[in-house]
Amino acid sequence: MAMLQVNDIHSYYGHIHALKGISLTVDKGEIVTLIGANGAGKTTTLKTISGTMHPRHGAITLDGEHIEGLPPHAIVMRGIGQSPEGRKIFGALTVQENLEMGAYARTDKPAIARDLDFVFTLFPRLAERKFQLGGTLSGGEQQMLAMGRALMTHPRVLMLDEPSMGLAPVLVEAIFETIQKLNQEGTTILLIEQNAAKALQVAKRGYVIETGQIVLQDTAENLRKSELVRKAYLGEM
Amino acid sequence: MKATSNADLWLAVKIGLIGGIVVVAIALEGMIQAFSPRDIVGGVITMGQTLLLVTLLATAYIAVSRGESHQPMRALVNGAAAGVVVNCLLVVLIWLGAFLPLGAMFLNATPQLYDLLTLGLGPLTGTLFLLIAGLVVGAIAALIYLLPPQVRRAVLIALTTVLLMGVLQDLVTVTLSNFDAFTPITKFLYAQNGLSIAGALTILIAVGVASYLWSQKSAQVQARIDRLPPTRQRALRWTSILISIAILLLLPKILGLYLSEVLDNVGLYLLMGLGLNIVVGFAGLLDLGYVAFFAIGAYTVGVLTSPELGRAIITDSWWLALPFAVIVAVLAGVLLGIPVLRMRGDYLAIVTLGFGEIIRILVGSDFLRHWLGGSQGVLLIAKPEVGPIKIINPPEFYYLFLGGCLLVIFISMRVKNSRLGRAWMAMREDEDVAQAMGIELVATKLMAFGLGASFGGLSGAIFASKLGSVYPHSFNFLVSVNVLSLIIIGGMGSIPGVIVGALALVGLPELLREFAEFRYLFYGAALVVMMLTRPEGLVPEARRRIELEEFREEGGESPPGADAPVLKPAGQP
């Protein structure tokens, strides 16, 4: 039984039919990637799962429990954490306060302290900059902070929206290494990416989304070889 | 080198021109005539002359401080140049006035004004005098600028104090006259009209020396306090808190009736300011209709305790009506909150503005006249009683405001550092992400509206009782604007800031009564200058200060680097 199951969801922006029946599953311990071009519906899918948008049709279940239609804070508490597109860290809060804000919905202090330690070991840069305001971090550090903050919600499924966006190649490399490391330590990840090449390297399975529909789904390896992906997303001739 | 010094001179001339335009405007507004009968220092300098002198000094000082080169001679030349330019414009005014009928356009451009400007020396000698005066005063401004920073600070503080003591003569003498012991001091400091020469000199020297010594020693004193063991430090903090409370309790006795009234107004706006600070400062929800909650609190008390509305009286106890005022205000806050939950920024501001107007129009409407008194308002509202004492006069109401303010400050401080306070902070930064962190927006927003409204309701309840009557026109849009301005002036989200803002925005105009119809001109000018020079507010919240400093230094670029400012939580090394 899949951990996160999205079943035929339809989402709208007013009259615009943005998601036309998206279905996907994420199993425990997997990295699953959702790749697609700008405007294909990647972020809309994430917003629908996290509850900031509600689907008009379709079901979303987390470990068998229906979560579609729940308010966002309830979904966070059930275990879906996210690092939003464009990072969106709290610029006027310090690094540590940003991370603590991630644990807002939790009350188990010892566990929160453990997770904070975990984040600081995962990203030593953040530990160095603990008391610096979030807005004064570099792009790469902000991405680390956004991921760390999402981890502080102690998610069962971690959704990352374009973690490589706007970063220098070296940093992209580092971020993907961290994603892999996190996964090896047991975190289930739904990775949304435009950088298909990198995403398919770390993911186990992948979905390709085009204009609100899943057009292809397979293991990452097979996707890398597929004609469509190679032409449209990997830039090969 | 040559190029910069020429550029500096040009800058000085330009700033001088701006200062000159200000001076001419002041003259044509009629301020010089209006303020001439009053002396700052008796027989030496009138208030009108002081106004010109201060403008002149300030202009030259700004001109010198903006310059690139720091050679003393250059600074002197630039200051003198700026001073001469300022007074040149006055000379131009005088000569234009001598040949053209300026009085047809500017009512105040009379021979009397020219006489005042030239000290009665006539146009020719007067011109010479003004130019020399500009030169000398400009050079003095430069000299002040060239002093070592600590001395400069002391000199400026001393001069400002003398100025204030002169301007506030009536208030100070009336206050001091409450105490016989101070009579000789008053006699020494003040002449019939203005400060006495000896008094002015004494204040100048005493304040100057004191502030210089303080600037020398304050760091040492702070270091000594820091070295004390924690128990002693805590004892010291408690002693200072107790002393402050004692002073606060004695204040109306010291200040007398008029200033107690002023303090009551400050307290009223402070209560509202702290309430709006929750909504705008903490939660970041721009509310332009805050006066509504003030009105609701006032009218609830009015309706419950007034026998005037042509029906049986509900209660004659203000204390019994008070909780209802607060509860009704909270309900109104939540009711307003529900429809605007999805709105942000400007849209929210417009809707709340509408809400404020709706409440004002409702309480004044003929339709509800039977219940709310219509445009005649509600009269004979109950006064609070504490045991056998009935609270009636401003000094007695002061204690009510003080109690209310202390309670509200305490609640604000606690809530700011609570879980709810953190949720507001996240929401203020980014609503979407706050949601993604598991913050429940609906409850969090409604808590902000509700708590903010409760403070407004409380202030309204005290206000209604103090006046004994409420009228719809007391609750216009300007009240909301004033409350919002005092938060901005003080520093958004900062509790000490709201206190300072209330003192500055409500207390200051009362003290400026000396300037009669010109006081709002000064007040407006002060607001503009303030926002240009200190956009973060008088006592900004640490977080915002760092943010803005960052912004200024880096021109908006975020600097990756270890030298960025840090904000440590209390108790962290």
Image (cartoon, coloured by chain):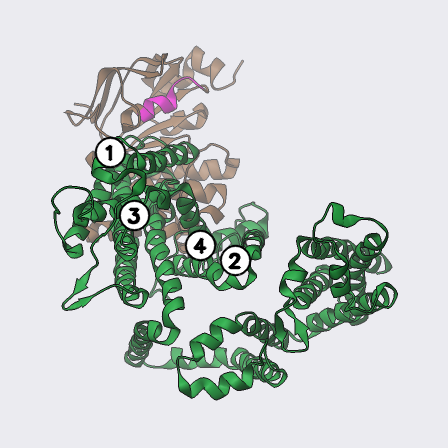
Which of pointers 1 and 2 lies earlier in the amino acid sequence? 1
Sequence-wise, the earlier of marks 1 and 3 is 1
Q: Are marks 2 and 4 in contact (CB under 8 Å)?
A: no
Give the number of the mark in front: 3 or 4: 3
**Among the two numbered marks 1 and 4 on one chain, the one whose residue lies closer to the N terminus:** 1
Amino acid carrying label 4: it is Gly
Name the chain under label 2: B
Contact (Cβ within 8 Å) of mark 3 with mark 4: no
Q: Secondary structure at mark 3?
A: loop
User: Between tags 2 and 3, which lies in front?
Assistant: 3
Task: Judge by depth and name the residue closer to the eye, B161 or B304.
Answer: B304
Amino acid carrying label 3: it is: Val
Q: Earlier in the sequence, mark 2 or mark 4?
A: 4
For chain A, the rendered hue is: brown
Tag 2: amino acid? Asp
Q: In the rendering, at what x and y percent does residue B241 appear?
A: 31, 73
Residue drawn 44% across the image and 43% down it: A142
Helix, strand or loop for disc 4: loop
Residue B513 visible from this viewpoint = yes
Label 4 belongs to which residue? B491
Mark 2 falls on what kind of element? Answer: loop
The reply to whether label 1 and label 2 mark residues of one chain is yes
Of residue A161 and residue B121, the one placed in the foreground of this image is B121
Which labelled disc corresponds to residue B470? 3
Q: Which quarter of the figure is the C terminus of chain A placed in?
A: top right
Q: Residues within 10 Å of mark 1 (few under 14, many from 20)?
A: few
User: Which residue position holds label 1?
Assistant: B368
Q: Quadrant of residue B406?
A: bottom left
Span highlighted in magenta in the image: A39-47
Circle 2 or circle 4, nearest the eye = 4
Name the amino acid type tagged 1.
Answer: Leu
* The N terminus of chain A - image quarter: top left
